[in-house]
């Protein structure tokens, strides 16, 4: 049997567009002689459809779309698509998350998802009811262990693949006892740094445990914050990867069950993956919203805005990117000249608009109110907010998408100005720690074979330039130190004592950083959606109360008790 994995990029809610995308790839698969073509999880609606599923007319339109696809697939071609389907039971949630197998316009079988994730960005229990049984799908004499995304992530393995999210059953193990000829998984599995390696290890383990081939068809593309890398693949029964789809782009992967298999290994670089994920995230946000003329960003001469600009140019082309430098009285010469050099290197439209008149006007307007007080953050932040107003005015006037350029390190500790540098439609680097931003800059230059990002931008000490001689290290720990703490606290969910033991950083410094992270949730809640590239990003996947009072000393005491009991 010849099977095609159609790694497509659906848009959430675009039923007509997704329908035509599915049918086009079905025709391609048919033209290549495929017997069966497989599409990702919820490929009809796009993932995640969220509360669109609460709209009865959307549900009805989805069912009509499924019926249309079934009737227009090329003859003699089996097709597996992902779609929400009504739950026939009187109790439970109204829908199932299903994999549907059609041939010649007729539904041959359907498999509903068992494991419904509710952690991080996922909230599937909100709309879907879990399957009660796991059964083999038999089609054209082949026994398919068909299942949906999360159903493959609860395997019993000493390393663990599911970040501790345990379920009562292991759907793949149950299917494995029913003598399948091969496993087929349809997924909408988001990208995060290192996810490719985790998938490799998981699928290899399943294959070796059950001695069966495994096919994984994963969504590609980005929908708002969430980026999907594709990375669809086929593994032989011994776990060897024998067919590999492209990453970060649509692809049609063909595999013949009878053909001799050769190993297909893909070398991956984490910085290159990060780069490609962010480019895809920008491009899809811009194109799928469909309401913007160009992308716009403020250029400060610093590393964050330079990297954001370079990524935007790769995503959209230089003709659709506008950079604006907005010097004030205390801006360094490099703030303007480095921005100008970057714009020239990238070939983008470049504007210089001084904010001095706006800052002077605010100083005069507030002079009486501020009389007798020492100048401080309030005065400094007027500059950032003047820049924010300027950029939003340009965005409104010309229909440009404003890209926010702040990085994860700054967002974590609140080193950002609300209604200033937090303005924007999407935050490109909000899940990228500062030290990773520098790696991205070097990668961009290496990839281009020239200094796209000026070397002076990379070399100079980072600064918000809101007062004379200001450097980030006047307020923050060195980024190498800060990021070592933030990565452990936010992305790895470690607490004070563990972080101190692993890093050797002074306990009071670590405690102060954790306090800053906790106290600045109110700023992050008002920031634009950020592109997710780690296992724990700010935004929909990290739900921390703004108003709370958690005594960290209690947590440390409990951790100490557990350590004693384990010893």
Image: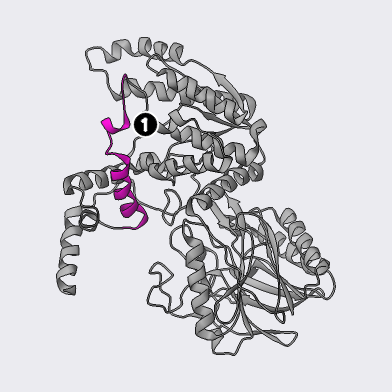
Q: Position of residue 433 (x, y in %)?
A: 40, 45
Residue at image point 73% right, 53% down: 17
Residue at image point 63% right, 59% down: 246
Q: On screen, 490 above or below 475?
A: below
Q: Nearer the viewer, residue 323 or 393?
A: 323
Is residue 424 in view?
A: no
Tell me which segment is drawn in magenta. 468-493
Q: Is residue 45 magenta?
A: no
Q: Position of residue 241 (x, y in %)?
A: 58, 72
Please, what is the dominant secondary structure of the magenta stretch? Answer: helix
Q: Position of residue 361 (x, y in %)?
A: 41, 11
Residue at image point 75% right, 55% down: 16
Quarter of the image containing the N terminus? bottom right
Q: On screen, 516 above or below 343?
A: below
> Furthest residue to the right?
75
> In the figure, residue 379 lies in which quadrant?
top left
> In the figure, residue 378 lies in which quadrant?
top left
Q: Secondary structure at mark 1?
A: loop
Q: Is residue 67 left or right of residue 11?
A: right
């Amino acid at each position: 049997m010849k099977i095609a994995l159609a790694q497509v990029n659906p848009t959430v809610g675009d039923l007509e567009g997704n329908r035509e995308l599915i049918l086009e790839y079905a025709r391609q698969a048919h033209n290549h002689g495929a017997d069966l073509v497989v599409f990702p999880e919820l490929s009809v609606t796009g993932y995640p459809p969220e509360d669109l599923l609460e709209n009865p007319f959307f549900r009805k339109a989805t069912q009509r779309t499924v019926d249309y696809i079934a009737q227009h697939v090329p003859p003699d071609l089996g097709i597996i698509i992902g779609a929400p389907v009504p739950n026939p039971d009187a109790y439970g949630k109204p829908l199932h998350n299903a994999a549907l197998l059609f041939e010649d316009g007729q539904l041959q079988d359907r498999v509903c998802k068992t494991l419904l994730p509710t952690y991080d960005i996922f909230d599937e229990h909100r709309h879907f009811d879990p399957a009660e049984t796991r059964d083999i799908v038999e089609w054209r004499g082949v026994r398919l262990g068909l299942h949906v995304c999360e159903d493959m992530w609860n395997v019993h393995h000493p390393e663990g693949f599911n970040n501790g999210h345990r379920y009562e059953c292991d759907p793949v193990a149950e299917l494995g006892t029913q003598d399948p000829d091969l496993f087929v998984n349809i997924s909408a599995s988001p990208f995060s740094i290192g996810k490719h390696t985790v998938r490799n290890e998981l699928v290899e383990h399943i294959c070796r445990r059950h001695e069966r081939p495994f096919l994984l068809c994963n969504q590609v593309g980005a929908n708002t914050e969430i980026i999907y890398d594709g990375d669809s693949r086929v593994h032989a029964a011994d776990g060897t990867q024998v067919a590999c789809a492209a990453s970060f782009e649509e692809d049609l992967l063909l595999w013949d069950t009878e053909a001799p298999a050769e190993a297909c290994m893909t070398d991956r670089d984490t910085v290159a993956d990060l780069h490609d994920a962010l480019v895809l995230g920008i491009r899809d946000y811009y194109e799928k919203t469909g309401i913007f003329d160009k992308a716009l960003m403020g250029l400060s001469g610093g590393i964050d805005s330079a990297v954001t600009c370079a990524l935007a140019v790769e995503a959209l082309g230089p003709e659709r990117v506008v950079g604006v430098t907005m010097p004030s009285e205390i801006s360094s010469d490099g703030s303007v000249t480095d921005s100008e050099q970057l714009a020239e290197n990238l070939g983008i439209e470049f504007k210089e608009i001084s904010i001095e008149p706006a800052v002077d006007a605010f100083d005069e307007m507030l002079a009486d109110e501020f009389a007798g007080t020492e100048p401080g953050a309030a005065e400094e932040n007027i500059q950032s907010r003047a820049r924010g107003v300027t950029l939003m005015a340009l965005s409104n006037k010309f229909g440009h998408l404003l890209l926010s350029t702040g990085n994860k390190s700054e967002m974590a500790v609140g080193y950002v100005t609300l209604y200033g540098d937090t303005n924007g439609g999407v935050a490109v680097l909000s899940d990228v720690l500062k030290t990773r931003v520098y790696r991205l800059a070097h990668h961009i230059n290496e990839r281009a074979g020239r200094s796209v990002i000026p070397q002076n931008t990379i070399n100079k000490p980072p600064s918000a330039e809101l007062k004379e001689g200001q450097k980030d290290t006047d307020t923050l720990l060195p980024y190498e130190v800060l990021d070592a703490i933030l990565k452990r606290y936010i992305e790895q969910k470690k607490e004070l004592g563990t972080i101190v033991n692993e890093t050797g950083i002074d306990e009071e410094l670590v405690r102060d950083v954790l306090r800053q992270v906790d106290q600045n949730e109110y700023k992050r809640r008002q920031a634009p959606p950020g592109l997710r590239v780690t296992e724990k990003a700010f935004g929909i996947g990290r739900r921390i109360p703004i108003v709370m009072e958690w005594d960290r000393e209690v947590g440390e005491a409990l951790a100490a008790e557990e350590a004693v009991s384990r010893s």
